[in-house]
Image (cartoon, rainbow, N blue to C red):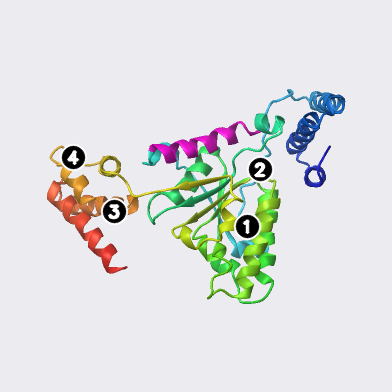
């Protein structure tokens, strides 16, 4: 039989006029009833759903997305969310095979979400990305939005976290209400500011309450939106967070082959026939994707300013070494 959460979801779908989501939840109820031995009830419920779809002029399993409003956040949400419409795709990124496969799986399940929901399951949609800065975590959120044709909402943590007791949790509820209303990709970047370990000695009571609220909202959320959290510091995250996410994806620094691919892609507009790629890849060792990209851009601009259509190995290696030196001085 229907759970309390499923009943609430059905009512919300009715209030929002989201028929497709209503049918998907109803099919989940039918699938659960079948698993619990209520075969007759499950069969009758499926027949009712199919009849309702047919009456509305739809095919039984034809996905029909609710239009995504192209709007800017308003009211209180204006200080909590920024929206962008991405043209980034997964093919634009250089990722380890294992990481790329994990993201492809998320996309596959999202594209087939109606079929998965009809079988009584939920597609992957709560994703935690961990790894060093500049390794592609934020860009992955952009690629998910670009691939799925959804807006990307980025949560502004400086507007979310306040010093007033209870205010942050109230703002967090506004964000999860928006997640429920509008299907999109929602990015919590620098997530450790919100999800730090609750037992940390330097923690304050308000942040612990906010984290407890976030855990509750995340667990209860049954929307069709994707929730993506990214952090450079997974070691300080509260342990309870990890099991609330459907998938945890770990990013690392690029290998020599990946570094070469990043450089070739960024320097493609120039003549690179004289470049010693193995030497450049060795110089890029230990740098992130973003640092390698910036070094390539610096070398390319130097070539353009010198009125050259080519960049040479010495200029690129020098730019890579400058990035490494800048990185060390900032630590």
Viewed as shown, does residue 174 lie left or right of 99? right
> Is 42 in front, or is 60?
42
Q: Which mark is residue 287?
A: 3
* Element carrying mark 4: loop
Q: Residues within 10 Å of mark 1 (few under 14, many from 20)?
A: some
- Residue 273 drawn at (x, y percent): 15, 37
Residue 104 among those drawn in magenta: yes
In space, the residues marked 2 and 3 are separated at their CA atoms by: 36 Å
Marks 3, 4: nearer the viewer: 3
Q: Is residue 87 above or below residue 117?
A: below
What segment is highlighted magenta in the picture?
97-113
Quadrant that contains the N terminus: top right
> Is 235 in front, or is 180?
235
Marks 3, 1: nearer the viewer: 3
Residue 35 placement: quadrant: top right
Marks 4, 2: nearer the viewer: 2
> Is 183 in front, or is 302?
183
Q: Are marks 3 and 1 in contact (CB under 8 Å)?
A: no
- Residue at left offset 30%, top offset 41%: 258
Residue at image mark 4: 271
Q: Earlier in the sequence, mark 4 or mark 2?
A: 2
- Residue 261 drawn at (x, y percent): 29, 40
Q: Earlier in the sequence, mark 3 or mark 1?
A: 1
* Element carrying mark 2: loop
Q: Earlier in the sequence, mark 2 or mark 3?
A: 2
In space, the residues marked 1 and 2 are separated at their CA atoms by: 19 Å
In space, the residues marked 3 and 4 are separated at their CA atoms by: 23 Å
Residue at image mark 1: 73
Q: Which mark is residue 224?
A: 2
Residue 201 among those drawn in magenta: no
Q: Are marks 2 and 3 in contact (CB under 8 Å)?
A: no
């Amino acid at each position: 039989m229907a759970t309390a959460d499923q009943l609430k979801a059905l009512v919300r779908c009715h209030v929002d006029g989201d028929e497709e989501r209503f049918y998907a939840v109803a099919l989940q109820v039918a699938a659960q009833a079948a698993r619990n031995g209520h075969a007759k009830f499950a069969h009758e419920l499926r027949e009712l759903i199919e009849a309702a779809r047919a009456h509305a002029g739809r095919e039984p399993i034809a996905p029909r997305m609710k239009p995504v409003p192209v709007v800017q956040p308003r009211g209180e949400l204006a200080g909590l969310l920024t929206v962008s419409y991405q043209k980034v795709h997964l093919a634009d990124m250089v990722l380890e095979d294992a990481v790329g496969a994990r993201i492809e799986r998320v996309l596959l399940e999202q594209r087939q979400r109606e079929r998965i929901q009809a079988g009584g399951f939920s597609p992957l949609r709560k994703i935690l990305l961990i790894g060093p800065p500049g390794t592609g975590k934020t860009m992955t959120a952009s690629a998910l939005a670009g691939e799925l044709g959804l807006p990307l909402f980025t949560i502004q943590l400086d507007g979310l976290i306040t010093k007033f007791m209870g205010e942050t949790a109230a703002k967090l509820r506004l964000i999860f209400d928006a997640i429920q209303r509008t299907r999109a990709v929602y990015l919590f970047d620098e997530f450790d500011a919100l999800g730090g370990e609750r037992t940390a000695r330097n923690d304050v009571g308000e942040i612990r309450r906010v984290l407890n609220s976030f855990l509750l909202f995340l667990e209860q959320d049954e929307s069709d939106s994707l929730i993506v959290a990214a952090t450079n510091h997974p070691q300080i995250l509260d342990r309870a967070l990890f099991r609330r996410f459907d998938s945890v994806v770990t990013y690392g620094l690029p290998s020599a082959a990946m570094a070469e691919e990043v450089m070739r892609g960024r320097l493609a507009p120039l003549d690179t026939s004289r470049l010693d790629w193995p030497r450049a890849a060795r110089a890029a060792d230990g740098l992130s994707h973003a640092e390698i990209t910036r070094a390539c851009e610096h070398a390319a601009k130097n070539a353009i300013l010198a009125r050259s259509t080519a960049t040479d190995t010495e200029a690129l290696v020098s730019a890579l070494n400058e990035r490494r030196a800048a990185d060390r001085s900032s630590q």
